[in-house]
Amino acid sequence: MNGEKKINIVLAGQGNSGKSTVFNFLTGLHQHIGNWAGKTIEKREGTLFYRDHTVDVLDLPGIYSLTTVSDEELISREYIIKQNPDWVINVVDSTNLERSLIFTLQLLELERPLIIALNMTDLAKRKGITVDSKKLQTILNVPVIPTVASRGSGLTKIIDRAIDLKSCKSVRKTHKYGKEIEKGIDKLSGLLNGVDLPYPLRWVAIKLLEKDGDITAMVSEKKPEAVESAAKITEELEEIHGHDSPLVIADERCHLSSRITRETIKIARNRKLSLNERLDALTTHKVTGYLLMALILGGMFLTVFSFGNWFSEWLESVFTEWHGWWNVAVGTSFWAALGWSAVESVLALVQIAFPYILPFYVLLYLLEDWGYIARISFLMDKFMHKMGIHGKACISFIIGLGCNVPGCLSCRIMESKRERFITAVLVTLVPCSAVSVIVFGLVGKYVGLMWALGLYVFATILIFIVGKISSKLMIGEPVELIMSMPDYKTPQIKSILLMTWDSLKEFIYIAAPIVIVTGVLIQAINLAGWMPAIASVMSPVTVNWLGLPAVTGILLIFGILRKELILVMLAAYLGTTNFSDVLTSTQMITLAVVSMFYVPCVATISVLWKEYGWKKALTISLVETLFAIVLAGLVKRGLDIFMV
């Protein structure tokens, strides 16, 4: 009986290279998302069955180098070396070949089997760029396959090549750097020869010259004289070049990448501006760029509101008779009431939360896949600098509109610890999709759309003020914005639906059990007659200061689990989803304000704990809770004056 035919590949590439599109095309629904052991970094794995082979695919984090600057970079290089996959598929952006090859050269230094997916060749052609893939293959001595991942073009050829060449050992070609650097690499490689190391000798030698802390510490235990020799060589390099040794190595890679690029690409002359370039000129212009941004984001929220209202009302008409059917079929006993509370909690979740979250995620991922999110970061850079951070933080804010958890995790794209922490604090104040359920489902639906949009403007002003204060309190200066600007490309419905499903799946798996349990628990407390006692303990805050019904105290406590539970459980407890019958306009706005700004949900707190420590996480939670209560109370009193 033949053994199982398996092949393991990993996808490695820089941000915006199309790596995620390749992963989604290859694995489809046969994928699962988790976290790397001991890390909060997302781990994506999948499987496909092709030519009698089971192909396991791992999507490494999108990175720009293999240093130890970030956890993502350390994870990537350690996995490639220690897990020894059959193939590393390097997804390269052919429209930015020179920049992409810098990372490719680092992968080659790891001496692992490599296939290059020369992606976005269609976009390159539109820009008048032609890449000679055969010449590039000859220079790098690894397979180079042109692909258009958005259409699936060339992707099966990658798997074909991986299967066909699995048992073949290719002759490695070393790409030489400058004379002084190569002399140092040779000397260190000689000293390390015979030492038991998990990495290639040449790669270790290069890392010693780059002053890599982890590699230096490892070598010092096994061959301390090699570390001493590396220190002398780096001093000589710095004296010759006048720069720090890691910069000298990086500059050599850039020169090598530039030379390879010049030999392999041709750029058409006198060509017309492409649609992408004309569109880019409009969307990044100092006048039209902001107008288009306002129209696009405004249209996005108007669509979410309109669709959410329509879908919510339609679901309400469907579910309206269910309670009567339940009473007839099951009865009105204590246990029947608890059973109905579980059913009603699920119905309320579907009716109130789902209609607003679904379109939000679809539109968010549509803009991301199209390439527009990076333009927003560019446009907002000047504004962000006034808050003590740069425009890249806008990406975290936009992600935070969907969920604060990935929003906080994405703060790692910020270059300094100071900017990462400030951005994370501000992300916790961004109204996530759960808060949007309250804003649209309560204020927008019953008070008016302009009031709902006004709350977002209000939140933006507060985030700016808090950012300004934070940047003054924390020592340091903001760095300049350095990020790649991806080309516009046709959004792929399959990728958008997969990403939307991943987000909805997480929402369903986490929220549904919590909604059911808390709905039953609240109903049990209510039937047992304990509700007045619990509510009275919090009434000095909820009733006297905020002017809300006493029951909202309990809902705010459970809202720490997930914010959308506030509205869902309010509907379950009051027995109606027509909140205008039980709340005034002032109460709706006040409840929305306190919900927007008080302690983040448990999941967000846990991420803050892991990323910045329990003291900072606890401080953020307590300060924001106090801030939200004081602010909502002041808003309530202002509304009492102006909404008479």
Image (tube, rainbow, N blue to C red):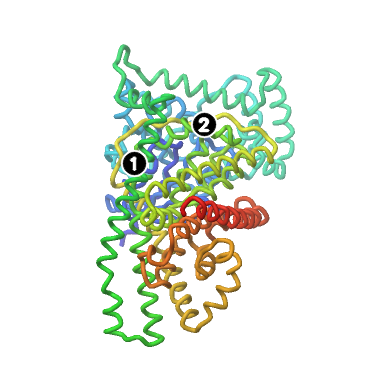
Residue at the extreme top:
270
Mark 1 in CB contact with mark 2 (< 8 angstroms): no
Q: Which residue is mark 2?
A: 381
Q: Compared with residue 175, is residue 6 higher up or lower down, i.e. above or below?
A: below
Residue placed most toward the observer, 209 or 637: 637
Residue at the extreme front:
644
- Residue 15, image x, y percentages: 45, 37
- Residue 101, image x, y percentages: 46, 29
Residue placed most toward the observer, 569 or 247: 569
Residue placed most toward the observer, 588 or 325: 588
Determine the image quadrant of residue 445: bottom left
- Residue 324, image x, y percentages: 28, 79
- Residue 457, image x, y percentages: 47, 43
Check disc 2 and give the amino acid type.
Asp
Residue plotted at (54% across, 34% down): 384
Assess disc 2: are there few (<14), some (14-19) or many (≥20) residues with their C-alpha within 10 Å of its C-alpha. Answer: many
Q: Which residue is mark 1?
A: 299
Left or right: where 261 falls relative to 39: left
Determine the image quadrant of residue 330: bottom left
